Structure formats: C-alpha cells, structure tokens
C-alpha cells in the first residue's frame, strides 16, 4: 500500500468518525427534547385529550379534538389524491413493465415502502412504549433509542457509499463490499461495544433513574448491532440488484418483530422486552441472509 493510499484511507476513517460523532450529538439533542415532552406531557394524556377542544390560555383541561379531526381530513384528502395515482401506476407497470420509467417506479416504490417500515419501527415505537408502560418508561427508553439510531445512521452512511461507488464500477462490487464490512467492523461495532460497556455511566448523566431503568435495554440494542451487519450488507445488495421489493419485505418483517414483540411482551416483561424485540428483529433476518451475503462477499 502506497503512502498516498494509506493517507486517503486514514483521512476517510477520520472523517467518518467525525460524522458519526456529530450525528450522535445532533440526534441526542432531538431525542432529549422528545424525552422531556413525553415524560412531562404523557401524564396529561387521557380520554378528554382526544375528545375535547382546547381551553383558553390559563384554563385547566381541554384536548386536541380539532387537531385530530384536521389531521384525519388531511390524510383523507391525501388518500383521495394518492390512491388513484397508485392504482393507475400499478396498471401502467402491469401493461408496460419493461420501460425505463417502469423500472424507476418499481425501484422507488420498493425503497419507499422499506423506508416507511423503518420509520414505523423507530417513530411509532416510543409512542407504543408510553401507551403500554407509561411516560416514565418512555423517557427511559429514548436515550437508548438515540444511541441506537446514531449507530444505525453511521452504518447506513457507510453502506450507502457502497451503492454509489458500485454503481460506477460494477466489477468492483465484491471488493467494495468487503471494504464496507471492514469499515463497519472498525467504526460501528467498537463504538457499539463501548456504549454497551459504558451504558450505566452514560445514563447516569441523565439521572440515577435512567441508569436503573434503561441500562439493560441500551445494552441489548447495542448488542443487536452485531447481527445488523449482515442485514445492512444484504440491504445494500438488494439495492444494487434492483430488488427493492425484497428490501421492503425484509424491513416490514423487522418492523413487525419489533412492534409485535413489544406489544406482546412489554406489559409483562417491561422495558427490557423492547430490547429483546430489537435483538430478535436483527438476529432472525441475519440468519436468513447470512449465506447469500457470505457468497456475495466471496465474489
């Protein structure tokens, strides 16, 4: 390896690390605000919140019925516009499926559906935790989700660069995939291991209650980063092979495991059930995709 290549790789690793750190800081601030809102506002959620109109400033009580009705109206109008477009797009794909535009529509539809499932498991999950376990447990969960989301963003940034580079040089796909695997093992997994080991002290920054209530779930979510590696590589493989339908199926299965496992086991097992659900949502797909990913890496 020449000095120039060594310097380029070292600079690339440094920049990726800096990006990951700032992504973690940015997302942490957002989730801290959300945790504050959930912890203090969750206590006020009752039936009146959904059925009553807002009170005047200074008056106690009231609800958000007008906002809920307004949101339903917006969703309804969006459905009136979007459903016919989706229906006729399906007809177009069925009749003229070999055209270039049809390929783009298929690719974007599958990728969009996959992203929607990803958002379901990340955005809806804190709401589900609050509804099942209460506002305090929801607040304890959010720092763990923040760290997990930051690690996921770093892994996504690494694998996304593979899509861009491999699109320019298809013959180098296998070599680039192995390079991405090395970067994940060097950057993401050690950072996850550090967060897992230091979880009690990191959560102590939020207070002793967070340390007692969220240490286990944070450690479990960091543990799930290990089986997430083959899943992330398989997601990249699907994008490169234009198999976004399989990508949507995979992400949908993961969302079902996370949300379903939390809904079933959290009422009895508590917040730790969320962590085990996240682990299951990564381990099960990892076992299914390990063989094709291994063959892909070998080339």
Image: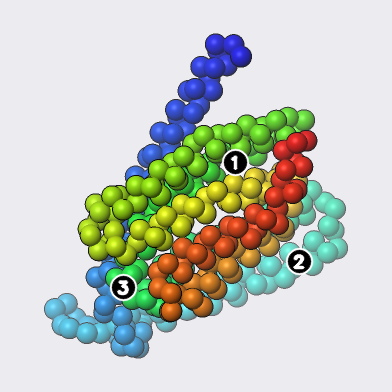
The image position of residue 187, as x and y in percent, is: 49, 36
The N terminus lies in which quarter of the figure?
A: top right
Q: Residues within 10 Å of mark 3 (few under 14, many from 20)?
A: many
Viewer-side residue, 262 vs 20: 262
Residue 44 location, x and y as percent? 26, 79
Q: Is residue 8 left or right of residue 113?
A: left
Task: Looking at the picture, tell me which residue is in the foreground, 109 or 166.
Answer: 166
Q: Are marks 3 and 1 in contact (CB under 8 Å)?
A: no
Instruction: Identify the disc placed on residue 90.
Output: 2
For the point 25% across and 54% down, the residue is: 204
Which mark sits nearer the N-terminus, 2 or 1?
A: 2
Residue position for label 1 = 159
Q: Secondary structure at mark 1?
A: helix
Q: Quadrant of residue 33?
A: bottom left
First of labels 3, 1 by sequence position: 3
Kindly report the distance in space between the C-alpha atoms of the residues bearing marks 2 and 1: 30 Å
Q: Secondary structure at mark 3?
A: helix
| Residue 156 locus on image (x, y percent) | 55, 45
**Residue that label 3 marks:** 135
Q: Secondary structure at mark 2?
A: helix
């Amino acid at each position: 390896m020449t000095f120039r290549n060594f310097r380029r790789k070292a600079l690339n690793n440094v920049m990726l690390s800096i990006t990951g750190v700032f992504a973690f800081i940015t997302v942490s601030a957002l989730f801290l605000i959300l945790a504050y809102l959930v912890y203090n506002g969750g206590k006020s959620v009752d039936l009146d919140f959904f059925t009553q109109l807002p009170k005047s400033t200074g008056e106690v009580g009231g609800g958000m019925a007008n906002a809920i009705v307004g949101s339903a109206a917006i969703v309804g109008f969006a459905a009136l516009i979007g459903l016919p477009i989706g229906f006729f797009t399906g007809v177009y794909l069925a009749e003229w499926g070999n055209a270039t535009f049809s390929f783009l529509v298929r690719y974007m539809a599958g990728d969009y559906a996959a992203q929607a499932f990803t958002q379901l498991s990340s955005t809806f999950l804190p709401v589900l935790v609050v509804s099942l376990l209460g506002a305090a447990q929801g607040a304890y969960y959010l720092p763990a989700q923040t760290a997990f989301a930051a690690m996921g963003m770093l892994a996504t940034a690494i694998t996304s660069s593979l899509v861009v580079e491999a699109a320019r040089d298809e013959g180098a796909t296998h070599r680039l995939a192995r390079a991405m695997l090395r970067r994940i093992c060097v950057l993401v997994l050690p950072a996850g291991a550090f967060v897992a080991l230091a979880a009690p002290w990191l959560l102590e920054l939020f207070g002793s209650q967070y340390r007692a209530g969220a240490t286990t779930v944070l450690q479990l979510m960091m543990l799930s980063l290990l089986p997430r590696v083959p899943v992330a590589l398989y997601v990249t493989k699907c994008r490169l092979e234009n198999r976004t339908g399989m990508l949507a199926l995979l992400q949908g299965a993961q969302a079902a495991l996370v949300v379903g496992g939390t809904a079933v086991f959290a009422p009895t097992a508590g917040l730790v059930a969320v962590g085990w659900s996240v682990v299951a949502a990564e381990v099960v797909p990892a076992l299914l995709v390990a063989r094709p990913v291994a063959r892909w890496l070998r080339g």
